[in-house]
Image (spheres, rainbow, N blue to C red):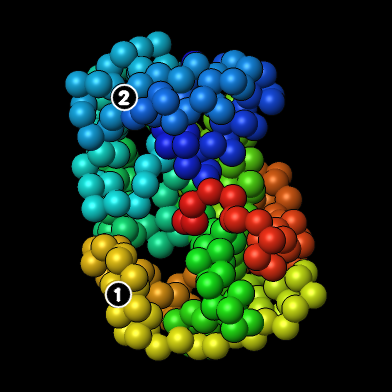
Amino acid sequence: MILVTGGTGLVGGELIRRLSARGVPLRALVRNRGKAAALEALPGVTVVEGDMARPDSLSGPLAGVTRAMLISTSAPNMLDVQSNLVAAAREAGVRHMVKLSGVIAEVDSPFRFARMHGEIERRIQASGLQHTFLRPGEFMHSYFRALPAILSHGELRLPMAGERIASIDVGDIAEAAARVLTAPGHEGKTYTLTGPESLSMSEVAERLSAATGKTIRYVAADPEGVRQAQLAAGVPPFIADALFELFAERRKGREAKVWQGLAELDVRPTPLAEFAARHAPVFRGERPPPGATA
């Protein structure tokens, strides 16, 4: 039995759909069953209620589970809630934990969520659980955050200066996770996952332009100006500051490298042009983006 956490999120939801399509029985851990009707309708999926912030709610969902996929929202309590799941999984006798981590998971990183991911990986290693770490780079879905300026001014405004990034499609991450969860031989391994190309933001804008039939140009935004605009728009200070730290790391080229993790798992990486063509109606403002950005 496989348990997947974060089933109502982008990666977790896509992973559950793919496992269901393969005929793999699984449990989807959610905090509110009322928000998981779409998951409950999938063949082979059992929705179980539990909250990783409340360790006492996890023993039932984990009973009989052999493999667990650990995903949670990037939130201030991410270290605590994921550590709770690790401890509960060890107590329940789970044999193999797969963690969705980050491309720069380092305990001494200037980026707070990279520090959390690094520490959670360390705790999983110390727990005695067999483990696999999936470290994806920037989600292509993140470009949906730039929609307001794209739609109103034809501008891709990001605080990236002239740096490059190797973004990855969420579907490719989910496919990598599905393969790790359903086949032996991945224990103790770390797969760093990126798309197939490292692009400048001007090149990203060119691909969005080609897909939409509209001219979109890259504008290098001022990092502090972006942070202040986010705060003014109601973004919580913790998240605004985290994004400020993240883009500072990206401007150092920390996410510019193309890694071969997908190839190691025999997953074809999706080019940005293909992602942009699939979501061209979103970038033209003809339909809303699919789910939350990441």
Q: Would you say the residues marked 2 and 1 are in contact, meaning their CB atoms lie under 8 Å apart?
A: no
Task: Tell me the residue at 51%/25% (across/down).
Answer: 37
Residue 210 seen = no
Q: Quadrant of residue 94?
A: top left
Where residue 101 sits in the image (x, y, percent)?
Answer: 42, 49
Q: Earlier in the sequence, mark 2 or mark 1?
A: 2
Where residue 36 sits in the image (x, y, percent)?
Answer: 47, 28
Where residue 239 sits in the image (x, y, percent)?
Answer: 30, 63
Task: Tell me the residue at 36%/28% (across/down).
Answer: 32
- CA distance separating discs 2 and 1: 34 Å
Q: Assess disc 2: are there few (<14), some (14-19) or many (≥20) residues with their C-alpha within 10 Å of its C-alpha.
A: many
Q: How many marks?
A: 2
Q: Quadrant of residue 205?
A: bottom right
* Figure check: 58 above or below 13: above
Residue 288 tag number: none
Q: Amino acid at mark 2?
A: Gly
Foreground residue, 170 or 157?
157
* Figure check: 89 above or below 259: above
Task: Tell me the residue at 67%/82% (across/down).
Answer: 216
Q: Amino acid at mark 1?
A: Ala
Residue topped by disc 1: 232
Where residue 133 sits in the image (x, y, percent)?
Answer: 45, 44
SS for callout 1: helix
Task: Tell me the residue at 50%/66% (across/down).
Answer: 145
Q: Assess disc 1: are there few (<14), some (14-19) or many (≥20) residues with their C-alpha within 10 Å of its C-alpha.
A: few
Residue topped by disc 2: 50
* Figure check: 64 above or below 16: above
Foreground residue, 28 or 137?
28
Q: Nearer the viewer, mark 2 or mark 1?
A: 1
